Image (tube, helix red, strand yellow):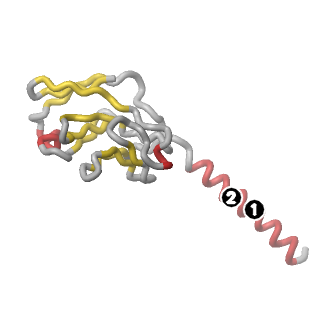
Amino acid sequence: MDRKEFLNKIGFGAAFALTATCLGSCKKEATTPSGPVDFTINLNDAANAALATTGGYVITNAVVIAKTANGYAAATVICSHEGKQQITYRSNSNQWYCTAHGATFNLNGTGVNGNASNGLTIYNTALTGNTLRIYS
């Protein structure tokens, strides 16, 4: 076997190995919670203390809940870009943000950059006393 033939064989093998690895590791996770969302949280619970301050957020039941300047907002924690469960709230821009790939969404779930073109699932919120309901 000459050098060119050897390099061709190595090249094809390396390309196959890289492709197989990427395809196997880049599979999507679930893109929405299973079934409809309908739960309540007590804003007085210590676990929800971040919601006492505008800009704070908590993640529970696969939902990110944020206290915005206009009240409460809720979105799925699962990013539509690659299904990563890494959506957070950015108070400085008043947007949802995926820490995995930089996808950014407005509070209505509309994508504002290329990684967010599929949008984000948004949920309704209703406040009664110290109980916040999050529902589909």
**Quarter of the rendering containing residue 8:** bottom right
- Whole-percent x and y of residue 81? 49, 44
Task: Give the residue type at disc 1.
Answer: Gly
Could you say where residue 91 lies in the image, as x and y percent from the top left? 24, 49
Outermost bottom residue = 3
Q: Amino acid at mark 2?
A: Ala
Give left or right: position of 136 versus 81.
Answer: left
Residue 18, compared with residue 118, is above or below; it is below
Q: Position of residue 126 (x, y in %)?
A: 20, 25
Examine the image and state in which quarter residue 32 appears: top left
In-image side of 67 versus 114 (left or right)? left
Q: Quadrant of the C terminus?
A: top left
Q: CA distance from mark 2 to mark 1?
A: 6 Å
Q: Which residue is mark 1?
A: 13
Q: Please, what secondary structure does the residue beneath circle 2 have?
A: helix
> Could you say which is closer to the camera, residue 17 or residue 68?
68
Q: Which mark is residue 130?
A: none
Residue at (20% x, 40% y) in the render? 67
Residue 75 image offset from top left, x and y in percent: 33, 35
Element on which disc 1 rests? helix
Name the foreground residue: 40 vs 75.
Answer: 75
* Left or right of 51, for residue 88: right
Above/below status of 64 relative to 39? below
What residue would you read off at disc 2?
Answer: 17
Answer few, some or many: residues within 10 Å of disc 2's Cα (few below 14, many 20 plus, some between 14 and 19). Answer: few
